[in-house]
Image (tube, helix red, strand yellow):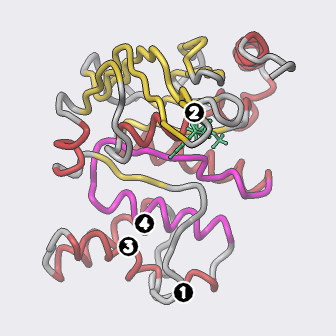
């Protein structure tokens, strides 16, 4: 899929310090990053390096304390009001008392879509995540992987160009995760979305991304940005190729360099 030169997210010298009872916590410091339209950007790093915080700043759920960030040329607040992104959380976060289609409908109701438009969007997004026919089920009637696909469908229902995904597959077993990784790549290729994706998994980051942002903690910062040289077409077997393993090696080295075992 083509990546254009159009910038979707631009962070310049971005920093965020939380004031806590135990003193200031530098969650992010001096982050410079450009995410272009059509990019699939993974954020990888140990716990506490600021991955979630960065996504939350994009989504206007946290405000930076230094530097700047723009989303589609707007401030995060303007982008939030313009529904410029969909957000997929770590856990599927579906309402158990609502059917899958009613879960997907929820944000559409808040936005005041007509019944017809809602129906169209629900059908289209269920199809995109291969859940056609499951709209009337309740979350507990679906497997963990299907629930996570349903929460992706909910984030896609706005049809925003930007998708923010915070470790969406972290709680799933490896086989389900592989399958969802493949499906997500297909969905990305089909929809031309820009994706910011948080993960702890090196193979997942390398398999999915056009760009891998390696981060390290205390203070949370970017230590390496790796542009992938892998082809857009990625069967799962690509993970055994020398090119894939070389990128994985560079990510691992970046993680090691940023990590002190004395901390
Ligand atoms: N609301 C908050 N108040 C105070 N400190 C916070 C807050 N949110 C995050 N932090 C701290 O900021 C740092 C970065 O947290 P963040 O959740 O972004 O890391 P992460 O890389 O996503 O971690 P994980 O992989 O465990 O999800 C951590 O030290 C965390 O404790």
Determine whether the residue tagged by mark 3 lies in a helix, strand or loop: helix
Q: CA distance from mark 3 to mark 4?
A: 13 Å
Q: Which residue is mark 1?
A: 138
Q: Which residue is mark 2?
A: 23
Residue 220 falls in image quadrant: top right
Residue at left 71%, top 31%?
A: 46
Q: Earlier in the sequence, mark 4 or mark 1?
A: 4
Position of residue 11 in the picture relative to residue 195 (left or right): left
Instruction: Select label 4 or label 1 by which is in front.
Output: 1
**Can you say which quadrant of the picture contains the C terminus?**
top right
Residue at left 60%, top 62%?
A: 91
Specify whether residue 233 is in view.
no
**Can you say which quadrant of the picture contains the N terminus?**
top left
Q: Earlier in the sequence, mark 1 or mark 2?
A: 2
Residue at left 26%, top 33%?
A: 71
Residue at left 37%, top 18%?
A: 34
Q: x and y percent of residue 259 in the render?
A: 76, 18
Q: x and y percent of residue 238 in the render?
A: 72, 28
Q: Earlier in the sequence, mark 2 or mark 4?
A: 2
Asked if ligand 1 lies within 8 A of label 4, the reply is: no
The segment highlighted magenta reads 144-173
Instruction: Select label 3 or label 4 by which is in front.
Output: 3
Position of residue 37 in the picture relative to residue 117 (left or right): right
Q: Which residue is mark 3?
A: 104
Q: Which residue is mark 4?
A: 127
Q: x and y percent of residue 199 in the render?
A: 64, 39
Q: Earlier in the sequence, mark 2 or mark 3?
A: 2
Q: x and y percent of residue 252 in the render?
A: 77, 18
Position of residue 108 in the picture relative to residue 31 (left or right): left
Residue 214 falls in image quadrant: top right
Q: CA distance from mark 4 to mark 1?
A: 17 Å
Dot 2 alpha-carbon crowd within 10 angstroms: few under 14, some 14 to 19, many 20 or more: few
């Amino acid at each position: 899929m083509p990546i254009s030169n159009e910038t979707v997210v631009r962070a310049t010298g971005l920093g965020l310090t939380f004031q806590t009872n135990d003193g200031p916590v530098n969650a992010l410091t001096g982050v410079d990053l450009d995410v272009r339209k059509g990019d699939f950007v993974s954020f990888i790093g140990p716990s506490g390096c600021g991955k979630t915080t960065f996504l939350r700043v994009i989504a206007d759920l946290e405000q930076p304390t230094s530097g700047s960030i723009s989303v589609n040329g707007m401030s995060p607040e303007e982008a939030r009001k313009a529904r410029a992104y969909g957000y997929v959380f770590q856990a599927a976060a579906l309402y158990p008392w609502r059917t899958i289609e009613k879960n997907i409908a929820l944000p559409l109701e808040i936005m005041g879509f007509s019944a017809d438009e809602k129906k169209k969007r629900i059908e289209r997004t269920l199809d995109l995540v291969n859940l056609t026919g499951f709209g009337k089920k309740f979350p507990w009637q679906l497997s963990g992987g299907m629930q996570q696909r349903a929460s992706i469908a909910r984030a896609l229902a706005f049809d925003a160009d930007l998708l923010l995904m915070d470790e969406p597959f972290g709680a799933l077993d490896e086989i389900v995760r592989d399958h969802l990784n493949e499906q997500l790549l297909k969905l990305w290729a089909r929809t031309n979305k820009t994706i910011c994706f948080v993960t702890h998994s090196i193979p997942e980051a390398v398999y999915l991304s056009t760009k891998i942002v390696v981060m390290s903690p205390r203070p949370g910062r970017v230590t390496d940005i790796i542009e992938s040289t892998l082809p857009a077409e990625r069967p799962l077997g690509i993970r055994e190729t020398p090119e894939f393993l070389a990128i994985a090696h560079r990510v691992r080295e970046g993680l090691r360099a940023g990590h002190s075992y004395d901390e």
